[in-house]
Structure formats: C-alpha cells, structure tokens
C-alpha cells in the first residue's frame, strides 16, 4: 500500500496493533497449543509492517508492506492503526491540527 503526506508540514507515523477487546484475537487449536506448551506466537510475528515507523516530508509518499505469516492451527484477527504526529511543531496554545492519510493499494 502507499501512504502520502498531503499536508504542508513534515509528519511522523508509526504502526501498531490495536490491543483492546475482540479486535485483536489469536485463537490456537488445542493440539497445537499443547505442543507449544501453552505459548502463543505473538501478533508481531504473525503480521509484519515495513516500515513500522518513518517520517514523510510534505507531498512525499512511501510504500508500506504488510506481510502475514501463517502458522498451522492459528486463526487470527487484528486491527493495525497508523498514528501520525507533526514534527517540528512549536505551538504554545491549543490549536486544532488537521491531517489526512491517503492510502492506495497496489
């Protein structure tokens, strides 16, 4: 997928997996779980996002790769969140900041 910074300011972004409630769920077959002595493969070894964090100058775009690694006996669902922050921003008062993230699948 491609992400683009359409704003006039440099932004930083980072990806993370949402960990609240039913949105992040790893189900493992009981036989597989017994063989692994109860240890589940963590979400960050099942899904990989590259780059996981970076900075984008105004108008710049970047290709982000999302990989899924299948494990026998696993059923997985999750939500990946892209957090965006403005860099080099020296605000002394509370001002609403507006940004958008343009995503296109290749």
Image (cartoon, rainbow, N blue to C red):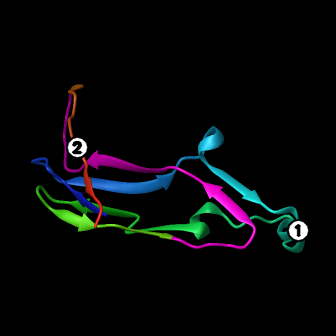
Image location (x, y in percent) of residue 20? 61, 40
> Which residue is pictured at 14% across the width and 50% down the height?
6
Which sits earlier in the primary sequence, circle 2 or circle 1?
1
Q: Quadrant of the C terminus?
A: bottom left
Q: How many marks?
A: 2
Image location (x, y in percent) of residue 96? 22, 28
Residue at the far top: name it.
Answer: 94
Q: Are marks 2 and 1 in contact (CB under 8 Å)?
A: no
Image location (x, y in percent) of residue 53? 37, 62
Q: Is-magenta flag for residue 15?
A: no
Q: Quadrant of the N terminus?
A: bottom left
Q: Which residues are magenta?
A: 68-92
SS class, disc 1: helix
> Which residue is pictured at 13% across the width and 47% down the height?
7
Image location (x, y in percent) of residue 45? 60, 70
Relative to residue 78, is residue 61 drawn left or right? Answer: left
> Which residue is pictured at 15% across the width and 59% down the height?
57
SS class, disc 2: loop
* Residue closer to the observer: 89 or 38: 38
Q: CA distance from mark 2 to mark 1?
A: 45 Å
The residue to which callout 1 is attached is 31
The residue to which callout 2 is attached is 100
> Which residue is pictured at 19% across the width and 44% down the height?
89
Give the quarter of the image for residue 34. bottom right
Give the quarter of the image for residue 13. bottom left
Closer to us: mark 2 or mark 1? 1
Relative to residue 19, is residue 14 drawn left or right? Answer: left
Residue 30 versus residue 23 in the image, above or below:
below
Give the quarter of the image for residue 52. bottom left
Residue 18 versus residue 37 in the image, above or below:
above
């Amino acid at each position: 997928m491609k992400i683009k910074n359409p704003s006039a300011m440099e932004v930083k972004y980072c990806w993370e997996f949402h960990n609240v409630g039913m949105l992040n769920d790893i189900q493992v077959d009981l036989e597989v779980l017994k063989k692994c002595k109860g240890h589940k493969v963590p979400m960050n070894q099942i899904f990989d996002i590259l780059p996981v964090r970076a900075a984008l100058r105004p108008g710049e775009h970047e290709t982000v790769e999302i990989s899924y690694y299948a494990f026998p006996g696993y059923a997985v669902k999750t939500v990946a969140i892209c957090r965006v922050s403005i860099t080099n921003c020296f605000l002394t008062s509370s001002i609403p900041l507006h940004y958008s993230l343009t995503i296109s699948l290749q």
